[in-house]
């Protein structure tokens, strides 16, 4: 079973601060995805990274896939209250039609 | 397109009762998934299907059953509800997989189940 560990589990910061959350595994994934989930709703895909070392930017969010495709990070610049939510990473195994999800990082951005 | 729809939105069951959680997608996706999410936790895969007539177990299949008679529908069955099955259940679908790439999973709004 492939496992993904996310850290920190909880993060509470002030508006305008920067933050980084991590997603780590001992397994290699063909791709890794980051989702954001708001209370009472399903997860919504933010980004997919495929190539080792790949960096993708989505406005104030920067996603990086580790060179060995075992880990990933999400960096948010100048966080806003609207960034509040549960951030989930999910690793995809090429040989299986399914993803493994981490337990998530709950982010609270205070105004 | 409505995307992925789930019914019911909320349900209370007594221990030992049975029920079926419905999931339908109108995007002609081959892959469909059922996850459960416990409070403050990530998603655990219960069952998934790579196409009509084909299903496979995920991480936590015990106590659940699925069927996939059509591309659109992927119901999840609880035969003997237990308090441990209290959770939020999400259905998702995705397009046929392109090898080496990660396709987007589209999630439904979830079904909140309370077993007392």
Image: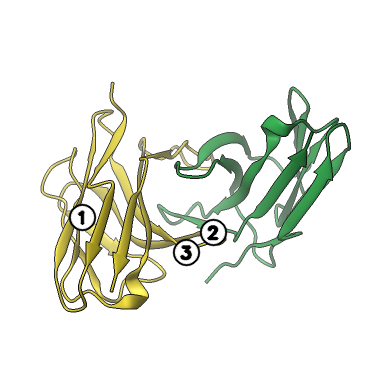
Chain colours: A green, B yellow
In the rendering, at what x and y percent does residue B100 appear?
A: 54, 42
Q: Decide if residue A86 is in sight here.
A: yes
Give me the disc on residue B42.
2
Q: Earlier in the sequence, mark 2 or mark 1?
A: 2
In the rendering, at what x and y percent does residue A61 appear?
A: 75, 31
Above or below: residue A13 compared with residue B5: below
- Of the two numbered discs 2 and 1 in the rendering, the one whose residue sits closer to the viewer: 2
Residue nearer the viewer, B89 or A22: B89
Q: Quadrant of residue A14?
A: top right
Q: Quadrant of residue B112?
A: bottom left
For the C terminus of chain B, the image quarter is bottom left
Q: Mark 1: which secondary structure? A: strand
In the rendering, at what x and y percent does residue B27 appear?
A: 28, 28
Residue, disc 1: B54
Query: Which residue does the image show at 16% across and 78% down from the upper left?
Result: B16
Taking the image as shown, residue B17 lies to the left or right of residue A28, namely: left
Query: Which residue does the image show at 37% across and 41% down from the upper left?
Result: B109
Q: Mark 2: which secondary structure? A: loop
Disc 1 crowd, CA 10 A, few/some/many (<14, 14-19, 20+): few
Give me the disc on residue B38.
3
């Amino acid at each position: 079973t492939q496992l993904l560990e996310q850290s920190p589990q909880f993060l509470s910061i002030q508006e305008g601060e920067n933050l980084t959350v991590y997603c780590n595994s001992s397994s290699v994934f063909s791709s890794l995805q980051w989702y954001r989930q708001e209370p009472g709703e399903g997860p919504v895909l933010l980004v997919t990274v495929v190539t080792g070392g790949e960096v993708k930017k989505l406005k104030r969010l920067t996603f990086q896939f580790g060179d060995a495709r075992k880990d990933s990070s999400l960096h948010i610049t100048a966080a806003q209250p609207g960034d509040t939510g549960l951030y989930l990473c999910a690793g995809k195994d090429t040989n299986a039609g399914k993803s493994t999800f981490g337990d998530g990082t709950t982010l609270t951005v205070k105004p | 397109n409505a995307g992925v729809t789930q019914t019911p939105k909320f349900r209370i069951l007594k221990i030992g009762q049975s029920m079926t959680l419905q999931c339908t997608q109108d995007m002609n996706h081959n892959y469909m998934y059922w996850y459960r999410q416990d409070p403050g936790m990530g998603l655990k895969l219960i069952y998934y299907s790579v196409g009509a007539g084909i299903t496979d177990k995920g991480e936590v299949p015990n106590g659940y059953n699925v069927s996939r008679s059509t591309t659109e529908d992927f119901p999840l069955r609880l035969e003997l509800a237990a308090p441990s099955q209290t959770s939020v259940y999400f259905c998702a679908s995705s397009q046929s997989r392109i090898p080496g790439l990660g396709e987007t999973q589209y999630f439904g709004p979830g079904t909140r189940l309370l077993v007392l």
